[in-house]
Amino acid sequence: MAGASMLSSNDILLFFKDVEADRFLPGDRYLKRIVRPAWQLLHSKQKKTGFRVSFEMLEVALRRAGYQVHVNRYDLARRNPGHPVGIVGFPIILHNWTLPNPALLGPSLYDHPGLKLDLFKDERFKLLLTLADWQHRMHQRGYGDRCVQWFAGIDTDRWPDLSSHAKTVDFLVYDKIRWNHDRLSESLLNPILAELKKRNYRVEMLRYKFHDHAKLKEAMAQSRALLFICEHETQGLAYQEAMASGLPVLAWDPGRMVDPIWKPFDKAAPETSSVPFFSPACGETFASLEAFPDALSRFAAKWPSYDPLGYVKAHLSQEESARIYADAYFSLAANARKESTALPVAAAG
């Protein structure tokens, strides 16, 4: 099918571009393309951006659902201009976009609709995928009914249930503080660690971007629960992978956007969540340091009754992720056919 000129209702064309920018000198991004493979062999930090991880999860879910997925096949798209395309990743992919095909945008791209309020003035762009409820609401204020809510499905084969694994750690503390890290370490994280120590809990620490997936999986296997420290998430793959692995989650959830990106566009910080896909079956949340001791006590009392894996299976499955995406994607083709048949027929001369 890869070389065919005609596409069917089983073919999905995805286009992806990762974060790429010059850092020190003009054009040094091209040098980074060359040295990156060697550098990644030499360190154990995270090797993939969130853009790429989300894209790969989408691709895997669609393939497992039986779709023929073509990645960055500009030739196929040009030969089939009425067939939809899915555009994923960093906004640079939209710069000088030349394909005529109707397009489903996202996930990723713009963090706030104010960054590109005229996005849908380009008539090729039809719909935008959003993730968390709070992100969906924020983008709806800018784009209205063009937004379709989606999630990346969690692969429970890759992240299997580890509940029966021998545990040497009570709380795996996942530090994903992204803004004002030094200040929040002193005012929030260190007091939390002190409270855990006072109650004789065994703790292991991981910091965002300073580990790879192998280390994360090893730490989850040894831990009874995840303590998640993050300002806000549009999905939150790490805590969901922990839930798939059978770890209930105790999460700091301050409830407002910390990323200053909102300031030019909103009068107040938008409402957010650090655990946007969550329920009482998954664990507990706390909004402030003052609320942490009571949340920890509630968590300890309910610890045996949580069912985070059940939540993942019911609400974050790959099957449902693929269905939502495919429904939105192929709706573009159906609408294009309706529009073409609605065009007036020219009178014979």
Image (cartoon, rainbow, N blue to C red):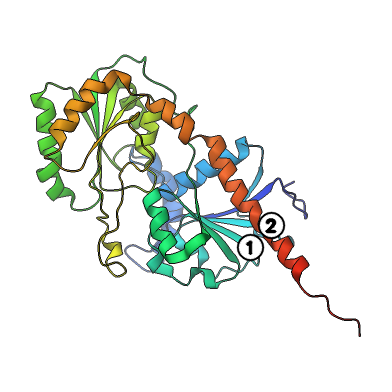
Of callouts 1 and 2, the N-terminal one = 1
**Residue 186 location in percent, x, y?**
10, 44
Q: Position of residue 243 (x, y in %)?
A: 37, 29
The reply to whether callout 1 and callout 2 are in contact (CB within 8 Å) is yes
* Label 2 crowd bin: few (<14), some (14–19), many (20+), radius 10 Å: some
Where does residue 295 sit, x and y in percent of width and height? 19, 32
Q: Is residue 263 above or below residue 305?
A: below
- Circle 2 sits on which residue? 333
Disc 1/disc 2 C-alpha distance (Å) = 8 Å
As displayed, is residue 74 above or below residue 114?
Answer: above
Q: Nearer the viewer, residue 49 or 301?
A: 301
Q: Tag 2: residue type? A: Ala
Residue 102's label in the rendered image is: 1
Q: Foreground: 43 or 69?
A: 69
Amino acid bearing label 1:
Pro
Kindly identify the residue that appears in the image at 75 percent across and 46 percent down. Answer: 1
> Mark on residue 196?
none
Residue 26 quadrant: bottom left
Secondary structure category for the residue under label 2: helix
Viewer-nearest residue: 23 or 202: 202
